[in-house]
């Protein structure tokens, strides 16, 4: 999402498509069901349909499999997201199109992870200066 999206006062309605210009991204219509919003450090359970490795800071790697990770950010030019391990020691990049499991979780103060079942898509709220 860009500043220009916020200034338009309407939520973006296109699906990021790898290596294509914005004008060629698919437009979201009423047939799509909103699942959840993602912000940095949100917990997500993911399982890619193809093998993706977590790369650790010591250079080692292991298959991601299906696990709880933390959202770092998105690269809309390649339609990828970056996720990290709970201790920030490992990281992986993966495409959103090929995920078998993609769920948002809330982690409580004791470390218990609970799935988020439903979120409402919230509009932008930009404060206007009063004159």
Image (cartoon, rainbow, N blue to C red):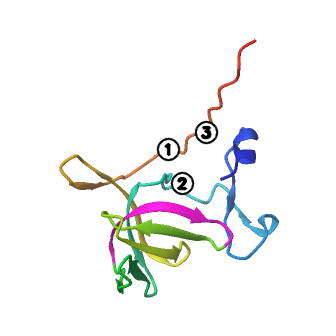
Q: Is residue 62 left or right of residue 33?
A: left
At x 75% / y 46%, what residue is drawn? 4
Q: Residue furthest front?
A: 58
Name the spot of residue 99 as percent of width and height, x first: 47, 75
What whole-number distance in Å separates the C-alpha atoms at marks 3 and 2?
13 Å
Q: Which mark is residue 120?
A: 1
- Relative vertical location of residue 97 with respect to residue 107 in this rendering, above or below: below
Q: Specify the quadrant that holds the C terminus.
A: top right
Name the spot of residue 63 as percent of width and height, x first: 35, 85
At x 71% / y 20%, what residue is drawn? 129
Q: Judge whether residue 106 is colored magenta.
A: no
Q: Of callouts 2 and 1, which one flags the residue occurring earlier in the amino acid sequence?
A: 2
Of residues 48 and 54, the one drawn nearer to the viewer in this rendering = 54
Q: Are marks 1 and 3 in contact (CB under 8 Å)?
A: no
Q: Which residues are magenta?
A: 66-77
Of residues 36 and 4, the one drawn nearer to the viewer in this rendering = 4
- Relative vertical location of residue 64 with respect to residue 123 in this rendering, above or below: below
Q: Can you identify the residue that label 2 sits on?
A: 34
At x 63% / y 38%, what residue is drawn? 124
Q: Are marks 2 and 1 in contact (CB under 8 Å)?
A: yes
Q: Which mark is residue 8?
A: none
Q: Residue furthest left?
A: 110
Q: Judge whether residue 76 is colored magenta.
A: yes
């Amino acid at each position: 999402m860009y500043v220009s999206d916020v200034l338009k006062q309407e939520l973006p309605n296109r699906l990021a498509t790898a290596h294509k210009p914005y004008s060629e991204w698919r437009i979201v219509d009423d047939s799509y069901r909103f699942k959840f919003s993602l912000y940095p450090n949100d917990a997500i359970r993911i399982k890619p349909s193809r093998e993706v490795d977590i790369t650790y800071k010591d250079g080692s790697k292991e298959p991601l499999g299906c696990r709880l990770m933390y959202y770092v950010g998105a690269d809309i030019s390649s339609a990828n997201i970056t996720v990290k391990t709970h201790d920030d020691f490992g990281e992986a990049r993966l495409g959103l199109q090929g995920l078998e499991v993609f769920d948002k979780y809330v982690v409580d103060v004791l470390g218990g992870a609970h799935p988020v079942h439903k979120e409402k898509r919230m509009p932008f709220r930009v404060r206007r200066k009063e004159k």
